[in-house]
Amino acid sequence: MNQTTRSLAIGLTATILGAAATPAAAQRMSGQEAISALQNGGYVLVMREAPASLEAARSSGRGGGFGFGGGGRRGGGAPAPEPTEEALEPMSAAMLTGMRHAIWTFDIRVGAIYTSPTRRTREHAEEVPFVEITVVDELSLDEADSGWLAGKLAETPTDDSNTIIVTHSPNIENDLGIGNVGLGETLIVRPGAEPEVVGRLGLREWSVLAIELGG
């Protein structure tokens, strides 16, 4: 194991064991325990969107809003319009590929994916294409106090699967009481009347788990 991987693995263990206080007292999990729990299903993975920027949007060749009909070059070689929404950084997309590989490696079943309508969260969700993605307006920054996330965290996923929700820091802070979630970080939540955050994984740490535990 090289020094970088070793440092990330140490950081992963510290992060999971030191999960922040939540509306209910959090159970402590090791990396292996977290993966085993997700393999059994019944959890909600609450993800803050990965790092994004307007520069990445300019480089993508798409102007305006997200995706469809947004840009590229128009007739006559006219430049794409100036983007109005941030796009995922290339490194974010690469690390999300590592997350997707880890979820596949560990056979973690995903039954539903919900995302904020903003471009960067939709791009984040589309890098984890296990099931159809549902865009939820109440997960946007403008609806951070809607309580939609809190309502979904009261529901237990069915069929031994897990649910993924991609949203923003204010939404997470309002509904889970955690204000220090890093860009791209995942909170592993046991849903219910009093949801518990039982683990936290940084974006790069998914890949570390695949290396350390996946062989």
Image: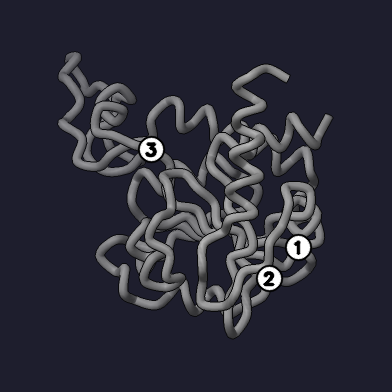
Which residue is denoted by mark 3 in the rendering? 51
* Label 2 or label 1, whichever comes before in sequence order: 1
How far apart are the alpha carbons under marks 2 and 1? 8 Å
Looking at numbered disc 2 in the image, what kind of residue is underneath it? Pro
Label 2 or label 3, whichever comes before in sequence order: 3
Residue 24 lies in quadrant: bottom right
Residue denoted by label 2: 157
Percent across and percent down for residue 189 are 60, 65
Badge 1 marks a residue whose secondary structure is loop
Look at 29% across and 31% down and name the residue there. Answer: 57
The residue singled out by tag 1 in the image is 41
Characterize the local packing of mark 2: few (<14), some (14-19) or many (20 or more) Cα atoms within 10 angstroms. Answer: many
Which quadrant of the view contains residue 62? top left
Secondary structure at badge 2 equals loop
Circle 2/circle 1 CB separation < 8 Å: yes
Q: Amino acid at mark 3?
A: Pro
- Density class for disc 3 (Cα within 10 Å; few <14, some 14-19, many ≥20) is some
Disc 1 residue type (three-letter) = Gly
In percent of width and height, residue 191 lies at 62, 74
User: Left or right of 106: which side holds 178?
Assistant: left
CA distance for labels 2 and 3: 28 Å
Q: How far from the left and from the top, in percent, is residue 71?
A: 26, 31
Is tag 1's residue or tag 3's residue first in the polypeptide sequence?
A: 1
